[in-house]
Amino acid sequence: MAYEIYLKKNEEKRIVAGHSWVYANEVYKISGEGKNGELASVFSNDGRFIGKGYINHASKILVRIFIRDSSEDGEELYLSRLKAADDYRKGLNFSSAYRMVFAEADNLPALIVDRYGDYLVMQCLSLGIDKRKKMIADCLVKLFSPKGIYERSDVSVRKKEGLSDVKGVLYGEVPDYIEIEENNIKMLVDVKNGQKTGYFLDQKENRFAVRRYARGEVLDCFCNSGGFSLNAAMSAEKVLSLDISPLALKNVEDNAKLNGFENIETMQADVFEALRNFRREKRFFDCVVLDPPAFCKTADEVKDAYRGYKDVNLNAMKIVKSGGFLITCSCSHYMSAQLFEKMLKDAAKESGKIVRTVEIKTQSPDHPSLLSAEETQYLKFYVLNVI
């Protein structure tokens, strides 16, 4: 008999509401037997069926529920779920580059699939999904006929599942760089070595929004491959793209050349040090963009992350010209929207500037979030006017 998981009293409420994760410390007893990565049934304390998902005793998340009826996992289920996920995006007019599958939000926990033109990039973030990645890739081929599928399962969360990092071609052939079009701008995406699956697709609409505020000289910090820089260059006189990574800056230069932009310069430096140097030099910008990597990936890191976010935002506020704009982001769900806004208020107070909130946005609609799972709502995007 397969594993049967019985929860402690009242622990089912969050899961019944739509959350997928069953934590090991929420379990009252386990009966049956099986192997890690196999399908397990989950019941409330009084025996009511809650759902089924893949079990992994090596993880604090014991089961990730994605079936809530009598269905079994297999090709038919995956074909249906993958098609439904893609149909949702196509219904919103996503076509060239978008997140096709967003894990829990698409009822496929721990599975990420991104489309870059004729190619797909897949991430397997749990043992159960990892064991079925060939079947999933086969389903993607049947549904979408891509030229290639590349796996980017080289993320730290896999260690919590007892999995090692994996990168490589799952199907067909995949070039080092894939050209996409976003907001009428051409971008070369490094799917094999770029961050995440090669590009930050969740910022698509926010990058477009920057054009309204980019004027004069713009400083784009943590610029990565230049998504914000290129959009800013559409309306600004000059853009300075700043990153510590030489590869990122090369990508910015290549993307600028691809689009014929001559108003973008790059600078290799640690952002924190560079902002302090600009303050000492009394060098000011009409607009500053801050899109840092996640400063906290666990709840234990929030205090240190708060100080980091405050430091970088405070120094950025200090070098924005009067009347200019600070565009600032956080991609860590542990830094909640309320906490992020409190940090901005503290930074504004210490900067001695009067700061107005102009616009607040979140992740692109191809990254929908579940109201029942706050982890799926993670991106904060603020446009601030520094008076």
Image (cartoon, grey):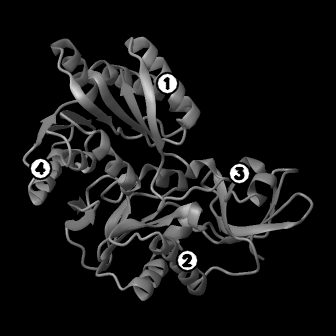
Question: Taking 201 as reference, is 387 above or below it?
Answer: above
Q: Which of marks 3 and 4 is in front?
A: 4
Q: What residue type is labelled 3?
A: Ala
Distance Cα–Cα, label 3 vs label 2: 31 Å
Q: Quick one: SS at disc 2?
A: helix
Q: Which amino acid does label 4 sit on?
A: Glu
Q: Quick one: SS at disc 1?
A: helix
Residue 41 in sight here: no
**Closer to the N terminus: mark 3 or mark 4?**
3
Q: Quick one: SS at disc 3?
A: helix
Give how far across and how far down residue 66 sits, in percent. 66, 68
Distance Cα–Cα, label 2 vs label 4: 38 Å
Q: What residue type is labelled 2?
A: Ala
Q: Which residue is drawn at 10% across and 51% down?
A: 261
Question: Which labelled disc corresponds to residue 253?
Answer: 4
Task: Report which residue position mark 3 lands on.
Answer: 24
Q: Residue at x 35, y 59 (%)?
A: 197
> How many numbered circles are shown?
4
Distance Cα–Cα, label 2 vs label 1: 39 Å
Give how far across and how far down residue 287 sits, in percent. 27, 32
**Closer to the N terminus: mark 3 or mark 2?**
3
